[in-house]
Amino acid sequence: MNRVDFMCNPVSCRSVGIRFVSRLRGVLRRAPTWILSCACLVGSLAAYADAPLLPPPGKIFQVASLKSSDYWLYDSVFKKLHAALGARGWGDAIVFPDTLQYRLESGSHSPDSDSDTDSQASAVRNIWARGGFDLLLSFGTIATQHVLNENPGTIPVVGGVITDPVGTGIVSSKTDSGVDNFTTALNDNPGSSMFLALHRIVNFKKMGILYTDTKFGRSFSFVNVAVEVARDIGFEVLSYTDISSEDTVEECLAGVKNLYNRGADVIFFGSLTCIDLTVSDPAPVYDFLDSKNIPAFVADDRNQVKKFATLGVVNFDSHEVASFHADQIIRILSGAKPRDLPMIVPFNFRLLVNLEAVRQNKLDLSLDVLLEADEIYTHRLRDKK
C-alpha cells in the first residue's frame, strides 16, 4: 500500500475534523453494548497492570537470607532492599528475623570463598530442613550455588550480588534462570563495555589481572571477558594467579610487582579482599603502582577510585539492584513464579575518574573523556571514610 500524505489548510482541516468527530459519535451511539463493555474492560485491565501490588491485609511474610561471607556489598544491597520494600508499601508485610539470617562459615572475607565446600553444603541443607520462611535471599555466587544444589524446589529463591550468573552456570541464560523457584539480577553486558571503554581512554598494550585461579575467581575478576575483548581489539592480558582465597595485601603486592616486571602498563582489580577497604589497607599496593606510574583500574567500587585508583567502572549499582530485587520479591510474594520474571537490570555502567591519580600516573586524558565521566574526584581522599 502506498503512503498518502494528507494536506489541508487550517480552515478545511477544522471542517473535516468536526465532521469526523460527529460521525464517530453517531457510530458509538449505535454500537452494540458488548463493544463498549469490552473497551471498558481493556481499559480496566491496563490500569490494573500499572497499579502497584499491595500486600495482603494482615499477612506477614518471613524472609531468610544467606550470605557467602561478610562482604560489604552484600550488606549494602540488603540495607537498600529494606528501604525499597518500605517505599513500595511492603515494609510492614515483610520481616527479616535475626534467627533467619545466615552466613557461610569459611574464615574468609573474600566475597566468595569455597574453602570448606562440604561443611558449607551441609549448612545449607540444614537451613532448608529448618525452614520457617516464605522466601530465601542468597547473596554471592558460592551461597547461591549451594542453595541451588540442595534446592527442594518448594520455596522461592532470589540470588543477589552474583558477578556473572551465566558464566558461572547459576542461570541457563540471560532470559531463563533454568529453575522454577529461582531468579536473580544480571547485567546484560557484564565487563565487555568496561574493558572497551578503559582501552579507548588509555590505549594500553598489556593489562595485568590478579585473581585466584578458580571458576569463581576468574569470574570475579572478569578474566574471560578481558581475554575476549583483548583478542578483538588487540591488547594482551597478563595473569597472576598465585593468590590464595584470602588474597592478602602481601599477596597482591607481590602480584603487581610480578606483573610490572612482565611489562604490564595497567593493572585491573576485580573483587579482591586485598583492596577491600572494609577489611584491608591497600595503600602499599597502590603506592608501588604510583612509583612506577602504572594506572590502576577497578570494577564496581567507588571508594577505590575516591581514595586510590586512577579509573573505575561501575557495572553494578547497589541502589538499582536493590530496587530491582524489591520488585521481584513483591511479585513473587504476590503469586508470580520466579523463573517467569525478568532478570536483566536496566543499568548503564558509570565511568569514574580520579584526577590526582591521573596526574600521578602521567596520563593525558582528553576533554571528551572528562565530559563522559559520570563522577570525577579531584583529589585522593585517603583520610576520608
Image (cartoon, helix red, strand yellow):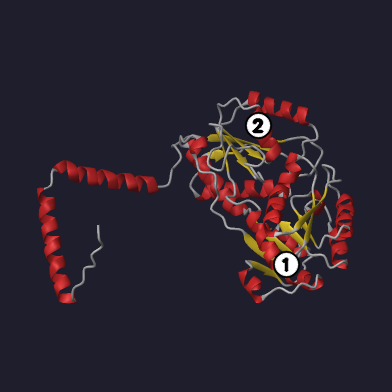
Q: Quarter of the image holding residue 152?
A: top right
Tell me which amino acid carries mark 1.
Val
Q: How crowded is the residue under tag 2: few (<14 C-alpha within 10 Å), some, or many (20+)?
A: many
Seen at 67% across and 34% down, the residue is 145
Residue 253 as seen in the image, left or right of residue 28? right
In the image, farthest residue toward the top? 129
Seen at 77% across and 52% down, the residue is 278
Give the mark toward the camera: 1 or 2: 1
Residue 341: x %, y % from top left:
50, 40
**Which quarter of the rendering shows the N terminus?**
bottom left
Q: Quarter of the image holding residue 34?
A: top left
* Labels 1 and 2: the sequence-earlier one: 2
Residue 189 as seen in the image, left or right of residue 312? left
Residue 261 as seen in the image, left or right of residue 383? right
Residue 330: x %, y % from top left:
50, 41
> Residue under circle 1?
202
Q: Determine whether the residue tagged by mark 1 lies in a helix, strand or loop.
A: helix
Work out whether 293 lies above or below 113.
below
Q: Which residue occupies the foreground of this view, 350 or 307?
A: 350
> Residue under circle 2?
147
Residue 154: x %, y % from top left:
55, 26
